[in-house]
Each structure stands twice: as structure tokens, then as C-alpha cells.
Amino acid sequence: MDGKLKADLFCSLLMARHIMTGSQIKRIMEEEDIPSVEAFYEEHKRFMDEEHISAEQKENWEKFTSSDAYLRIDEYVEYVSAREIRSINRLDPVYPEYMQCLPNMPLILYYRGDLSLLEKKRPRVCIVGTRRPSVYGRRVTRDFSKKISMHGVAVVSGMARGVDSCAHEECLSCGGKTIAVMPCGLDRIYPKENRELYERIAREGLLLSELLPGTEPIRQYFPARNRILAAISDAVVITEAGKLSGTLHTASFAAAQGREVFAVPSTIYSETAEGNLALLKDGATVATEPEDVLAFLAHVVFFREMEEIRDQCYQKQLKEKIESSPETITSSEIRKIIMDMLAVSGVSTDEMVKESGLPYRMLVCELGKMELEGIIAKDGNKYVLTIRV
Amino acid sequence: MGQAVTRNAKVKTLYLQGLEGNIAEVEASIFPGLPSFEVVGLGDSSIREAKERVRASIRSCGFTFPNQRLLVNISPAYLHKSGSSFDLAIAMAILLASGQVTTQAMNIVIYGELSLVGQVRPVPGSISRLLCLETIDDTVLCIVPSKDMDEAGLLGCDVYGVDTLQEAISIISGDKGEAEIRHVVSDEPGQLLDPLPDPQTDISALRGQPDAERAIVLAASGFHNMLLVGSPGTGKSLSAKILQGILPPLSREEKIELLRVESALSVLSKEDIASGARPFRYVHHTCTPTAMVGGGRNASPGEISRALHGILFLDELPEFTPHVLDLLRVPIESGEMVISRNNCTNVFPARFMLVAAMNPCRCGKCMESPSECTCTPSMIASYQGKVSGALLDRMDISCTLNHISEESLLETMKGDFELQSMSWRRRIEEIWERQYERCDEAGIARCRNGEMREKNLGEIFRLGQKQMEYAAMAAHQLQLSVRGLQRVVRLARTVADLDEKKDVECEHIVEAISFRLPQWGSNRGG
């Protein structure tokens, strides 16, 4: 019996039955100094009083304690784990950091497949659109999904009919990785005709949902699902969206969460793409080719790497290291030093040697590699950054 | 005497054609008839004038000039010959023919210019002549102007040096008694070259410019062509001088090859012959095509040949006529310059290290402080465009020099630093030796990395599959031409040699790439 899964399922049940909200659970855990969800489950009875929950919630709790869901929870856990469904919660180290810092992110996520697709360093692009795309819309979706996935970028979508399914299918057929965020429990398949696609993504990609297994798809869950779509993506591409499409929700979530929104333009007379044009009018970025999106991602990935390096080491420690034992400096540390020096303006090799105190050879080798990767370029006698914020 | 018989005599002499020494026979014939003196055998005016010098010399030495019909033939008669070196041979042939001098020697080789009072003067081309002497199998009695004894000493030739016609006569007639005759015997090993003096400017003067320092060391280690780009006063000429300072001394073979060129142009001093210093030819930008690569009516070697095994330094590269610069392309590739004239084809050796310096623009500031640059973009483009891409393509190393900071400037003034050029010189000698060994292993002519023109560089230079792919990837990324890729590989090999690595690794390739041609903003591509 998977204790973690059980605890996670229990917390989800509390939320689904309106006994506690996610933030209440979190608050209790913080106040009572509870280290994990499992520990919370062990002691959950302690918190079901007036001090922690309202009268109404208490009533719900009492109803819940007498229900099958509570009494036969072990059977339920068996059912879920038999379907290869796993869970992560916000206390797990694998819970993505970029989601932690957003408001309204789920306490618990269920998944099937390869969770490593959610790692911070892996770029992800969400491709969404209307359920009834035109021929043009399909073609755009396929083109973007193909090019983007061929560059090792995971394609995120909602597995809905139309553009979403199209994006997943194209990505898989190119051997790419895809993530589907479902508007229902992961033991359900929606829409039904996507059974094959569903199984394939479970095997080769990642299925995600915040909903308890067993939850049927209901329209009101769709926008909530869209906020996760946007949250796990670095950029959202809207290939074709109608005027009132749910896709526009995804776009507005993305904008609110600080993700780049790309909209592909089409003819102004097209009804199926009115949403795109509206987005463009609102200031979405124009994407006329997949490279537009890829170029943006290159920046994102690069700065993410830089940030990582910055987190790892501090300049002062580095200085000491250079003086005491230059041979132990790693290439990423040298990169960091170079990036810092080039941040403001171009610098010549001679100046860099002088400023950093690094051995000439090490510096030159790293500069060469960075130049080959296109991060920096030589302009006359100076090196400059090719990527600017 | 006075009888109506013909008397003949002949001696051999050595003359210069281009850089080649050749053997000619000088025959003198005296027969009855009205007194006259003719020289035949396609000689030019300097040979025709020899008649008067010979006549005066013979008389001033107390001999009689034959008062009969006198004919001198210089064979092979179908080749054009020139120069004053035939004087001594003509005089000797006449004296032998007239019976005033007798000899036991079978083969006499003799050359030199005569003065009116019978002094023997040195002539250019001594080394080539003496080298030619070595090709004669028979034992010969060789008499040369005493000045050429230094060269003979270097080559180890068996010759007698003379200062006067009288001395030459006493050697030939076997009467060597009184005159103090200088004689070099071939069994002696060739004399050693003088050790190189310490360089005038030490490489430590480049403190604060590690990029330039490294470029110079690499250029010297692989004998790579180098381009120095920098604003006025950043030390371009200084760098070239320092580069010369860290080059190892000439080997004996190299020295002899160089002396062939130098001696063909003028008479060399003793110091010139003994010095092991590599040439440093500072060529001015008004240089004509002929002066640069050689040529002229009598096809003499140019600056590129005089820079043999040393440095050809072209300051202010864009100021040179494009035509002159483009002439350099072939000799850089082939290591020699072929010049054909109507009667012969001359091959001048031209293995040199091209070191060129240039400003980035006319005012020189566009790189260092663009805001102060007074050139328009089109001016900059046309300035840089004067150097053809084809020539730039042959520069293995390109180094941009920067103004050094105030601090470093102060440091360079102190002068309390350790001198490093000498130790580099020794180190580079070892590195060259390793490069030669690699050539031997590959079964190709010995050369340094920068001179390597073989196609299978990867194999000879020991690059693995991975390294080859890496280099190709880099070349693709940076849009380098095939020649550009070879340039990178050659330089990478030198970097690895400096690291004392047997195989070239990726990091060596990366460093080599950092010395590729400068990219001047948008003005010029890869």
C-alpha cells in the first residue's frame, strides 16, 4: 500500500468534499509543523474541529466519515495505483518550482508517465486552439508542433478535439515528448475517441490532472485545467481560436502568469480565427513560423541556465578559488564570470584576463565554446553577448 | 715563341645563373696573325669589358700580353652569360696558353674579378658557385677570391683563396712557398654558426596583452602566418620584433639556402655568413611587384626569397598595392617562386613566415573607441577591403591588439621582469623538432605545422574522429571555408604541441578558433 498516494488522495478528497480547502490544509501543516502529507493523514482527526474548520465544513466531514469513500479508502488507493496513477504534492521536491511561486496552483497533482518532462531545465510549449479548426488551423498546428518537438521541446496541450489532439499526435509522430493536462480524473478518457492517443501519451509522454481519479469531465473544470496548461509551459502558442473559445482562457492565464503568448495570424475574414486576431490586437506576440517560438525559447533556456549557475556559486567564493586553485574551476563557473563581465558592454580577451584573474588558456577555451554555441560573438577585438534581455 | 703554331689552354670557371651556380670552360687560343683579342660565347657587356681588365692585370703582374691573334671562347656557348667573375679565368687561360705559366694540375677551377693592377676582387653568388663545385667528381684545384673562404669554410669546400693574380699563378704553378696561402680542406667539418645574441626586445614587454603574447608564441611554434590588427601604438611592430626574437637560430642547411639568395645579390660580410639569425624583412608598402617576388631582366630574387626561413613583415597591409599582395598567394602555398625569362627558368626558394600588420581603419580607432573614429562606414569597408580575402585566407593566426590599461602600462615601464624570450626560443626549437619527427613518420618532407600543405591533415596531425567532427561542426557554425578549416586544424596541432600532447583534442581546436580572422562588425563576413 502506497502511503503517500493514500495521503494525497485523502487530501484531495477533503478538498473535493468541501471539508477543507487546499490553503487550509497548507496553513494547518505550517502551523502544526507537520513535515509531510502522510503525517497529516496520520493526525487528520485532530484538526477536524471548530478551531480549524467552519461549521459547514464540519458537517461535511461528518457526512464524509460515514461514506464509503472514507471507510473503503484502501480499496480506492488500490484502484488508483492499479491504473499506474501517481501523485505529487507541493511538499515534494519534484513539485515544479515554477509552479510553487504562482497563486492558485494545485496542492496535489496526479500523473501517469514520465514526470521528468516537468523538470525546470526542459523547455515546454503549450499549443492550444479551437475544437473545430479549419484546414488552415490544422496545418498551422501540425507545422508548429512538428518543428517545436523536433527541437527537443515538449509540446503541452489539453487533448481536446481539434487543435489539441492534432498537436499531440503530430508531436508523437515526430518522436517528440508531449504532455496532456486532462480536465478529468486520469482513469477517465476525454474525449472518448482519443483512447489510443491517451495510452500512447501515458507510455511516451506525461498525463497530468489535479482532479481525483474517478472525476468525470465537466465543463466548469476546463478553465481550471487551462491554468495548469499555462503554468507548466514557457510559452503558449494559439494556432487557431474562435471568438469565445476556451483557448482564450489559457491565453489570459498565461499572460497573468508571465508566460509568453504567441498567436498565429490568419485572414481577418476567418470566423474560426477571430480569437487569434483579438489576441494579436491585445498585444500577443505574432508567430508566423515555428522559429519565432524557438528563438524565444532559446532565450528562456539560456537565462534559466544562467540563473542556475548564479544560484550555485557566488562571485566572492569564485575569486578566492581563482587565486588558490584555478585548475578546479568548472566550465560553468567560468561561463558565469564571462557573462558577468560581458553584461554591460563588450570586453577584449586581454581585459577579461586582467579583470577575472583566470588563466588565459581556460578563459580562451571557454570563450571559444561559447562562441560556437552562439552565446557570444567577436566584434572587432571585443567579445559581446549575442543574447540581450 | 714566334713560331707559326697554335697554342691552346683551358680552365674551368663557375658562374651564376639566377641562383644556380654553373660550370663553364674558358678556352684560350693563340695563333699567328695580326694582333687582336676576341672573346666569344654569348657574353654580355661585362664580359666584353673583361678584355681590358685582363690585359691590364697581366701586364701589371710583369707578364707579356701575347702580341698575336688571341681568341677566348666560353662554353657552353649557347647559354647567355654575364658577370665579371670570368676575369680571372680568362687571364689564367691566356697565361697558360702563352706558356708563361705551367701547371701539373689537371682540373683547374677558378673565378674572380680582376682590378687593373692584378688584384682579385670578390663577386656575388659565392655560395651557389661553391655548391656547384661540390657536384664535380674529379679532384680539382679550385681558386677563389680570398673573401669566399668564409663561405667555403661553412660548406667545407677544398679551395684556395687568393688576393692577387700573382698568388693565383703561384698556386697553379705549384710554387706556393712565399705567399701565405689560405686553404680550406674539405675533410674539415663545416664551421658552426655564431650563437644568436639575446633578443633586443623581450616577450615580457607584452605583459597586459596576453592575447598577443599567446599569438606570438603560437606563430613561432608552428611557423604560422600571422595578421596583427590594432590601433596605432598598440605594439604591432613590436610584436613582430618579439616574434623574431623567439625564433630559434637557423640550422646549417637553412643558412646555406638563405646564403644562396643573399650571396647572389651582393658580396657578404663575414658576420653575415656566420650569423644564425633568421631574416626579418621589413618591407615598405611602396614595394613594387618585382622587388617583392623577384624578377627583372636578369631575374633576381625578391623580398620573399630574402625572408627565407624568417619573417616577411608587411606593415600597413592595406596600403600595399593589391596586385603586389596577390602575388604572394602562390609562393605562400608552394614555398617557391618560379620566374621564367626567355633563356631560362629560375626557381627562387620562398619559405617564409608572413607577418602583416594593419589598422582596423584609416584613423585606426574604429575598434578601440568607435565614437572617436572619423571614418565613414564605407571608408572602413574600402580600407579593409584592400586586403583580398584570398590573402587573409592564408593567415593562420589573426590577433587583435588592444590598448593596454594604465596599470599594465606602468608595470611594463618597471623593467624588473624576468626575461622569457630565450627560454621560449629553446622550447620552440624542441617543438619544431617534434614537428619534423611527425613529418618523418608520415613520410613527407620536413616542415613545420604552418607550412604543412598536405591534404590529409587529420591523419598527419593525429585528430580523432570526434575531433574532426568537432572541427567541422565549428567550421560550419562559423562559416569557414575549407581552407579556413585547414587553418584551424594546423593551428590546433600547434596548440597541442605546446601542450605536449600527442593527439589534438577539442580544447585545442577551440583555442585555435579564437585566433581566426577578425569580424569587423557588419563590414565583412567570415
Image (tube, helix red, strand yellow):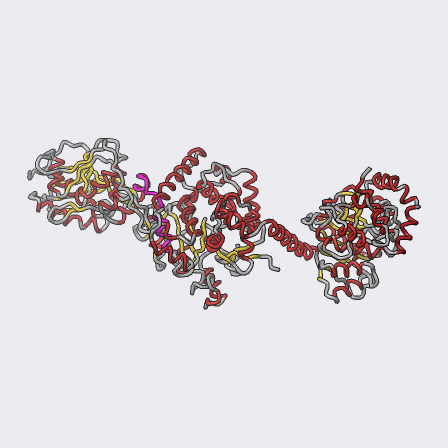
Question: At x 14% / y 36%, what residue is drawn?
Answer: B172
Residue B520 part of the magenta-drawn span: no
Q: How many marks?
A: 0
Q: Is residue A386 left or right of residue A251?
A: left
Q: Residue B339 location, x and y as percent? A: 36, 48
Question: Magenta stretch: dominant SS?
Answer: helix
Seen from the viewer's position, the closer of residues B365 and A346 is A346
Q: Residue B416 location, x and y as percent? A: 34, 51
Q: Residue A359 location, x and y as percent? A: 47, 48
Seen from the viewer's position, the closer of residues B521 and B74 is B521
Question: At x 91% / y 49%, what residue is drawn?
Answer: A62
Question: At x 60% / y 57%, what residue is drawn?
Answer: A387
Seen from the viewer's position, the closer of residues B149 and B115 is B149
Q: Is residue A84 left or right of residue B110?
A: right
Q: Is residue B472 left or right of residue A116?
A: left
Magenta segment: B236-255
Q: Residue B9 location, x and y as percent? A: 16, 37
Question: At x 82% / y 37%, what residue is drawn?
Answer: A1
For residue B64, say whether it is visible.
Answer: yes
For residue B345, say whether it is visible.
Answer: no
Quarter of the image for residue A266 reads: bottom right
Residue B245 part of the magenta-drawn span: yes
Image quadrant for the N terminus of chain B?
A: top left
